[in-house]
Image (cartoon, helix red, strand yellow):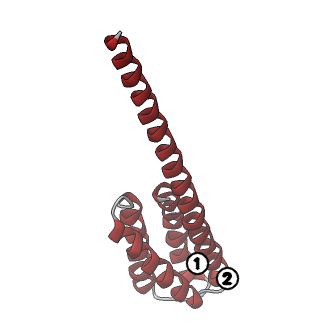
């Protein structure tokens, strides 16, 4: 799950960064305000993409998604882009969790099979010693 979420965040860095020139040219926002708002969000997304191995970073990324969604109201067409990327985030989390569950189940089956084979090998060697 964390790899998929990191990839979505990495693409969001680009998209959030591109909100700055759109805000300045189309919405007539002050460049310092737009750069400060979405520039900070882009840097936060980049940092959080690299820190997805930590549980707190995953929850912080959920907060970033909410901020991204709410600030997109300031731009024409921004809401559509934000909804697409938040949907990608949610899909990544859902599919990532399913993948993690499948990996864990596969690992458990492999460990159980290895334990059975070890017991069989130990049992066979102890039988050969008693003869």
Q: Quadrant of residue 48?
A: bottom left
Tell me the residue at 62%/84% (across/down): 26
Residue at the top extreme, as displayed: 131
Q: Is residue 50 left or right of residue 29?
A: left
Q: Secondary structure at mark 1?
A: helix
Q: Residues within 10 Å of mark 2 (few under 14, many from 20)?
A: few
Residue 96: give x, y in percent of width and height. 55, 59
Q: Is residue 125 left or right of residue 31?
A: left
Q: Secondary structure at mark 2?
A: loop
- Observer-side mark, 2 or 1, equals 2
Q: Is residue 74 above or below residue 35?
A: below
Check if mark 2's residue and mark 1's residue have beta carbons within 8 Å: yes
Q: What's the CA distance linking mark 2 and mark 1?
A: 10 Å
Q: Is residue 3 above or below residue 107?
A: below
* Quadrant holding the C terminus: top left
Q: Is residue 80 left or right of residue 3?
A: right
Residue 37: give x, y in percent of width and height. 42, 82
Task: Return the mark for residue 22.
Answer: 1
Q: Quadrant of residue 94?
A: bottom right
Give the mark, 2 or 1, whose residue is nearer the N terminus: 1
């Amino acid at each position: 799950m964390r790899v998929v979420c990191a990839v979505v965040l990495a693409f969001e860095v680009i998209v959030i960064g591109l909100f700055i020139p759109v805000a300045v040219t189309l919405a007539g926002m002050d460049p310092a305000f737009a750069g400060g708002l979405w520039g900070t969000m882009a840097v936060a997304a980049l940092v959080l993409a690299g820190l997805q191995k930590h549980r707190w970073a995953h929850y912080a990324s959920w907060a970033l998604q909410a901020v991204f969604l709410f600030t997109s109201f300031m731009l024409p067409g921004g809401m559509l882009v934000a909804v697409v990327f938040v949907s990608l985030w949610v899909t990544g989390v859902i599919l990532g969790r399913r993948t993690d569950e499948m990996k864990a189940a596969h690992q458990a089956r492999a460990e159980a099979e290895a334990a059975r084979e070890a017991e069989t090998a130990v049992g066979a060697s102890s039988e050969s010693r008693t003869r």
